[in-house]
Amino acid sequence: MTSPWVHLNQWDYIQLRGSLRYGTQISLLSYFKDNQAIAGYEYQILAAFCAANELDLEVIVYDNNGELFNDLNVGHIDVAGGHLTITEQRLKQFKFTQAISNTSVSLVTHYGYRDIYQIAELNDAKGFLLSDSSYINFLDDFNPQQQENITISEDYSLFDLIRKINSKNIDFTLGDTEIISIYQNFIPGLYTPIQVSNNQKVALMAHLNNADELIRRLNQFIIKSEQNGLLNSFKQHLLTYIPDIDTANTVTFFNKLQTDWPHVKQWIYDVAKEMDFDPMLLAAISYQESHWDVDATSITGVKGLMMLTRFTAKEMAVKDRTDPIESLRGGIKYFRKMKNKLPQRIRDTDRTKLALAAYNMGYGHLEDARILTQRSGKNPDLWADVKNHLPQLNNPAVGHTLKHGTADGRTARTYVENIMIYRKLMAWQQQKEQK
C-alpha cells in the first residue's frame, strides 16, 4: 500500500502542522523584532496571511542566504524571504510568489567616489559583495583587475558593509536601493552614483516542487491585499522605524557601539535582568546620558553612567555615583518613580516617553507642559501632543505663568526622541549579538 503522505503537497503539510515556517534575514523590509513589537514588511504580509488561514507563523532567522536557501531546499522552511529579487538563476531552483515590491541594485560608496559615472573608475577601490546574493550576478560588470579587489563574504550583513563604507574601511558594495534608502536616513556619507540594474521584482520564494497550492494561495492574498491597500499600509508602518535624528549623532553612536558598548553591556544586561527592566531602553538612556562613560561628570556636577545628581543619588540610595551597577540601579529607580507618578490611564508607550522627559527636566516641569497641552485643547496624556508644547517652557513670558517656572523643554524633547531612536538601534545590535 502507498502511504497517503506521499500525495500531500506543501500546503497540506502546512495545514496539518498548523503553522507556516518563514525563513529570512533581519531587516526592516523583512523581519525586525523591537522588544515585544515585531516590524518588517514581509513579516506583516505573512502574519496577515496566516491569520486569514488560521495558521501560526514561525520565523527562523538566518545569517546568510546560503543557509536560508539550503533549508528551503530540504524543506525545513516553507517560504524564504529577506527582500529577495527574482533572478533567472533562482527561477531554476525555486518558485516565486506575485511580486510584493520593486527595487534595483546600486553601487554604494563613500564621499571619495561620489561623482563617478561608470564602474571603470573603481580600479583601485576595495569592494565587498555578499555571497549568495543577487549582487553576485553583477560581478562581471567589473573588469578582471577590479574583481581582484572585491571580496565575496558571508561573514557580514549588508548593514555591516554599509558601516564599513561609512568609516571608509572599504570603498564600495552593491546594495538594494530600497534597503539603502532606509540606511541613508541615519548613516551619513553614503552615495549611490551608479544604478547597475534595471528595476527588479521582489517576492517570496518557495520550493520548486510541490508548492503550487501554497504559491496560488499566497498570490491570491497578495493581489487582494494590494487592491484593498493593505500592502501599502504595511509599507507606511515602516516609516515609524526610520530614525529621525541628526546623522552626526548616529556616527558617534555607532563608533561608541564598537569602542565602549562591549565594556558596559554586561553591567546593563545584568542590572536590567535583576530589576526586570528593558535592557535596550536602559542601554539607550545610559548612552544618551553619558555615552557609556562610567567616569562622566558634567559642569553641573552630575556623574556616572546615568548622570545622577547628588540629590537624586541620595534619594535612590546610591552611595557611589561612579559605580556603574549602582548608577544603573539608581537610574532605573528614578525613572520608575517618574513613571509611577503619571496617571495609570496613560498607555505605556506614552508613559515611558513622558517619564523620560520628567527624568531629564523634573516632574513638575513635565506637569506644566501637560497643563499647557490641555489649555490648547490637545491631549495631555499623549506624547505626540505634549512634545509640541515642551519648547514653550523655554519662553520666560510663558514660564512666569506656570507653577514651576521656565525649563529647557526643547532639550527634554530632543532627549526623549533620541533615546527612543537609540533604543531601536540597540534592538538591531541585540539581535545581531543573539545570533
Image: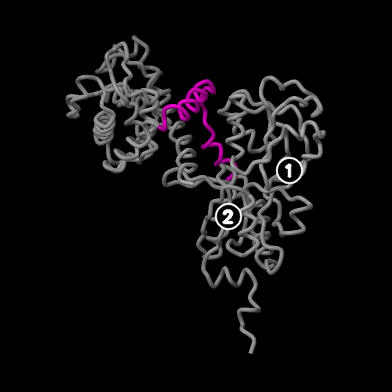
Q: Rounded to the nearest whole Å, what is the CA distance between mark 2 and mark 1?
A: 21 Å
Q: How many numbered markers are drawn? A: 2
- State the residue position of label 1: 136
Q: Position of residue 124 (x, y in %)?
A: 75, 25
Q: Position of residue 195 (x, y in %)?
A: 76, 33
Badge 2 amino acid: Gly
- Residue at image coords 66%, 78%: 7
> In the image, which residues are magenta?
233-262
The quarter in which the N terminus is drawn is bottom right
Residue 324 position (above or below residue 274): above
- Residue at image coords 39%, 37%: 280
Q: Position of residue 393 (x, y in %)?
A: 35, 16
Q: Is residue 250 left or right of residue 405?
A: right
In terms of secondary structure, where does tag 2 sit?
strand
Label 1 crowd bin: few (<14), some (14–19), many (20+), radius 10 Å: some
- State the residue position of label 2: 23
Q: Nearer the viewer, mark 2 or mark 1?
A: 1
The question of residue 191 being in magenta is answered with: no
Residue 191 position (above or below residue 178): above
The question of residue 238 being in magenta is answered with: yes
When asked about the image quadrant of residue 369, the answer is top left
User: Which of the two residues, 170 or 88, is positioned nearer the viewer here?
Assistant: 170
